[in-house]
Amino acid sequence: MALDHAILVSLTERAASGYDLARRFDASIGYFWPASHQQIYKVLGRMQEAGWVESTVHEQHGRPDKKNYAITAAGEAELDRWATVPSGREALRSDFAVKLRGFRDREAILTDTRARRADHVARLAEYEASEKRFYPDPSALDGAGLGAWLALRGGIHTEERGIEWCDEILTALEGRGSR
């Protein structure tokens, strides 16, 4: 997947400025497809050239003009095409797993594991709060709403497994000597 498709998905929900898209990424899609504000603006320009999005300029007094982007019929067609292409297996890149594999400094690994566990717990709380707020009755969902809830559930499961893995590491390391 390219950032283009993540932006198109976001624009199917509603038109937005580059700034609003970046904020949306920070609050949702960015949890599983991160992008900087600069990347989003660069891709929006490329997508506009390709005809996948169009922009309207809104004048703002005392501030630069604001461009709002909306998905076009060509962008919708691209999303439809992309949705039919099977997703490949995503590569797992983990600096932490490589550090575990090398196991050079027990205390550093313990410190890192505790910090990672705390991050997983915090993210899990965010996801669960979002689920409670936006999806109080998942059985009533269909279409894009169902897809958004299922993606959120994937995030919840990922954080739960991350906590379990950290707990396993801590149990294995805290109960052993300094080897």
Image (cartoon, rainbow, N blue to C red):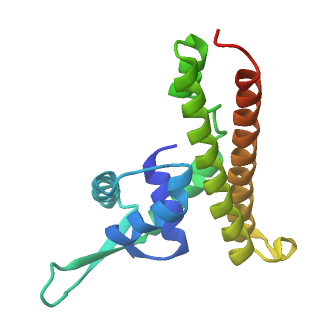
Residue lying furthest bottom: 61
Report x, y in % for residue 122. Answer: 61, 56
In which quadrant of the rendered image does the C terminus lie? top right
Please give left or right for residue 28 compared with residue 127 in the image. left
Report x, y in % for residue 33. Answer: 51, 49
Q: Is residue 125 visible?
A: yes
Give the residue at x 55% y 32%: 111
| Res. 134 image quadrant | bottom right
Give the residue at x 58% y 19%: 106
Residue lying furthest front: 177
Residue lying furthest top: 179
Q: Decide: is 16 above or below 45.
A: below
Give the residue at x 70% y 70%: 145
| Res. 166 image quadrant | top right
Q: Decide: is 140 above or below 92.
A: below
Foreground residue among 137 and 78: 137
Q: Is residue 94 visible?
A: no
Please give left or right for residue 56 compared with residue 24 in the image. left
Give the residue at x 55% y 62%: 28
Please give left or right for residue 3 compared with residue 163 in the image. left
Q: Decide: is 155 above or below 13.
A: above
